Image (cartoon, rainbow, N blue to C red):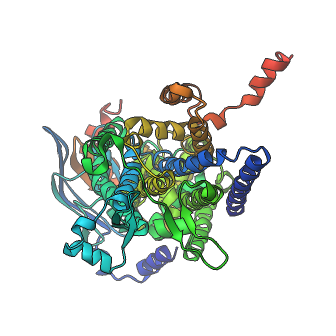
Amino acid sequence: MKTRKNCSLAALCLVMVGLHLLTVLTGTQFYLTQLTMAAYYGLVVIGLGVLMGYAGQISIGHAGFFAIGGYLAAALTTRNLTLWQDVWAVQWLGSLGLLVTGHDIYGARLLTVSPWAACVFAISVAALVALVIGGPVLKLKGHYLAMATLGFGTIIYRIFLASPYFGEADGISEVPGFTLLPALGSFGPLVISGDADHRVLNFYLAWSVLILGMGLLLNLIGSRVGRALRSLHSSEEAAEACGVETARFKLRVFVLSAVYAAVAGVLLTHFNGGIGPSEASVMKSVRYVALVAVGGMINLWGTLIMGVGLTFLSLRGVFGVYDDAVFGLILIFVMLFAPEGILSLRLKPVLRRLFLGPQS
Amino acid sequence: MSRSNGEAQLLETATASDLQIPMLELNGVHKRFGGLHAVNNVSFKVAPGNIKAVIGPNGAGKTTLFNLIAGNLPVSAGAITFHGREIQGKKTHQIARLGMARTFQNIKLFHGMTALDCVMVGRHVQSRSGFFAGMCNLPSTWKEERANRERSMELLELLQIADLAHVEATSLAFGQQRAVEMARALAAEPQLLLLDEPAAGLNIYETAEVARLICMIRDMGITVLLVEHDMSLVMDISDEIVVLSFGSKIAEDTPPNIQKNAEVIKIYLGEDDEG
């Protein structure tokens, strides 16, 4: 089983390289931009997949955690602190080396938080919010939990939409690139940004983060904790009787999936160079839920494939103006005809009947 | 295994004074649901290494009593002492960690998990690796995982369902599901095992097998408290029997004396309360 997991991850690495080669051979390197974005959205979806599919706790508020990560990273790395540079807190941050100076497009001096510090802060805040919200909310079950997380998502959306600090309806733009590692010797710097000359690098960075995230989650669901999560999904009473601290495990997996969403939010915001309130909207949360359902809930590979694949199609504009409607329809279709995910459908006999006629 | 072996040795060398510490002691336990006294001032003790049965007509409060002991329900009044520690008010998982395991009347196996995985959930209290160790697949988890797997397979073999280890547990036959639940409870290496109607829905051969199994569990040094409707099973294997009726204890004695007890015969055996 362990070797199968490693083989699958290796196959995913090959898929990554294969996709790059395919775009090179067909002269469609511009697809790499959407493939990069799809990988980050895929990270949100697999994190939610573990929460929903394995631990059985629905969340229709995960766009909120994505947005907390993205918005905080964007605000901290763009908002000019020059006016407050004499305040002790700003000076203290500066003495710790957490601030960077630069110049805006008009040449004025910019003093902002460094992307690394902003990243750590944004993810920590998302984790903390998940911890505080999750404590009371995860006592609810089923529809009630769905409604409560929906309410949370709506609140986060409204906060970002109404706050001038977060740019109201315009969101935040001009977010700088995120230098993960400075240039070392002959290697260039590892930068997350949307520059055309960083496109291939960013494709590989995003997919590496996705593969790493997938590997960690696959380890988790095969472990003692993974069994405990699946057990409390099925019967909290029986799980408790086996000694599983159900409340604590639910809370921890909720925080974990929020962190996955926040990491994706931070990285995608630096890649896109900005973030807008639509990233926090309820439709985004519903979309993540739909993607987990299409993938088959308790099937992390299906979730990954469907999450990345459908998101890529959506980002390429295949669904046109009906984008949100398509995801709503997908959710209905999956619930009616394939509750265990699209990949569970046995399409071969259906296709054979269609093309070869009924078998005698 | 080490704990149950140790327990067995302890029992062999125990003096009379040691045995006076009961495995489980209920003292004036009371449970009200609104105006209904589901469990009314019940007191009894379970001695270590014994098989004790709780019987009574339907609705006598047997399963409620089990839920009070296992911590699924809070007691309205009274004290429950497990191995010298008061456990009323503790959470179910805390009580489980102290060494109490249980099975359920309506089997509660985990959907989508193999029989082996279900039993390995039972090993939860015997292992400790958490989220971080699990996600990073730290070498420290490998040994623990292997030990859990081996012990779980041993228990499945003990219950003669080892060949079904990799079958989805909820798709098994009824008797096999009961066996998986029993293995899951034993996997926690408990000191006290609560069995809620272990023979319900089983045929006469399977019931005889359960009787043999419960005696074997007792011989492993595990104290057993069971609720059961099957009189032949209870009379054959129990060391002592508690009779409940409408939430109150009306008798507590050895099986032969219970069979002779006039009040028990009147409320339980003589009248048609069973239906």
Residue B261 seen in the figure = no
x, y percent for residue A299: 59, 46
Residue A341 lies in quadrant: top right
| Camera-nearest residue between A153 and B273 | A153
Picture quarter containing residue A26?
top right
- Say above or below: B234 vs A321: below
Residue A144 against residue B45 in the figure, above or below:
above
Looking at the rendered image, the quarter that the C terminus of chain B falls into is top left
- The x and y percentages for residue B47 are 33, 68
Q: Nearer the viewer, residue A145 or A304?
A: A304
Q: Please, is residue A191 above or below residue A343 in the view?
A: below
Residue at 31% x, 32% y: name it. Answer: B273
Which residue is nearer to you in this view: A72 or B233?
A: A72
Q: Residue furthest front?
A: A106
Which of the 4 quarters of the picture holds residue B80? bottom left
Side of A306 relative to A15 (left or right): left
Q: Is residue B14 visible?
A: yes
Foreground pick, A18 / B83: A18
Instruction: Give coordinates of residue B225: x percent, y percent.
Output: 37, 58
